[in-house]
Amino acid sequence: MPSQSHNEPLSAYMSDVHRTDLLDREQEAELARQWCATRDQRAAEELVQRNLRFVVKVAMGFRKYGVPVTDLIQEGNMGLIHAVEKFDPSRGTRLISYAVWWIKAYIQAYIIRSWSLVRVGTTQTQRRLFYKLPKALSQPNVVGESYEARIGRIAEDLNARPKDVYLMMGALKGRDLSLDVPVEESSMVTWGDRVRDERKNPEEATAEGQDEAVRHNILVECVGKLSERQQEIIRLRHLIDEPMTLRQVGTAMSLSRERVRQLEAQALRKLKGMMVPRYQRGANQAPARGARPAMTA
């Protein structure tokens, strides 16, 4: 027996929702009042069922993003359900006029979530760029305008920064590639087989950690042998999370920029002279990697 086409369930669903009659204004208002007053679940379900065709129509407008239409419809239905729960018939508007915003919001959020393993659309600016940038980039170039100027103009038009535009351009260009996909159609070699494991083995990681700890201890001890002024300059220039510039250090210590540079150079020469011999002595005394310690009687 031939297998059903994967489009048949979708076609059947769309035919089914289009066979469902729409509510007129009075029927809709009565069901909405009933839901608001008594939380009658049957009234809410009726409001949802009679408006499902609109969800399909909205979802079809987002097909170009490459997300399965069935997923878009499902998310849009969730938006419709949310809208029914929040709908206030006393405002005099039709349900679908209110619900279309929620339907689109749910669909758009789903597209962004499924677009990449790398998170995009985490800010309002990124979400706006995700949907508006493709159209802006498709517009003809201005004669004589450089690439950087074009991106700057687009960023200004979309109320964003150029770096946000560049970031979203990269996200829109490349979807995630499964590592299980063959490199070539007839090949058994996958992209995952081509990816080199850059992680260190446990032995290397342990040795590097120990070596880093040794170097850190030597640095701390040697810095302590500098003058107080040199210690402060080394700390501000190299040992804090956001190192200061020479001018900033000079302002903090009431010194000229040039004087700070001279003191820093002197301090670094002293540190090198103290640290290198100590580190070399420690390396020569350390047991060979992988060697076992000698057993004592």
Image (tube, rainbow, N blue to C red):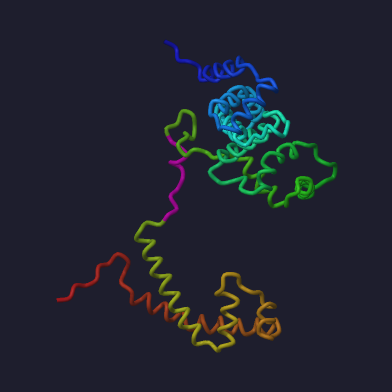
Residue 197 pos. (x, y %) = 43, 50
Residue displayed at 72% across by 39% down: 132
Left or right: 177 in relation to 134: left
Left or right: 84 in relation to 193: right
Total numbered circles: 0
Q: Residue furthest right?
A: 143
Residue 207 pos. (x, y %) = 37, 66
Residue displayed at 62% across by 26% down: 31
In-front residue for pair 286/69: 69
The chief SS type of the magenta part is: loop
Quarter placement of the C terminus = bottom left
Q: Residue furthest bottom?
A: 227
Q: Is residue 267 visible?
A: yes
Does residue 277 lie above or below 44 as drawn? below
Does residue 250 lie above or below 211 as drawn? below
In magenta, the rendered stretch is: 189-199
Q: Is residue 295 magenta?
A: no
Left or right: 74 in relation to 140: left
Q: Residue furthest left?
A: 297
Residue 41 pos. (x, y %) = 53, 29
State the image quarter where residue 112 is shown.
top right
Residue displayed at 60% across by 33% down: 37
Residue displayed at 39% across by 61% down: 205
Q: Is residue 191 magenta?
A: yes
Q: Is residue 66 visible?
A: no
State the image quarter where residue 158 is shown.
top right
In-front residue for pair 48/188: 48
In-front residue for pair 97/211: 97
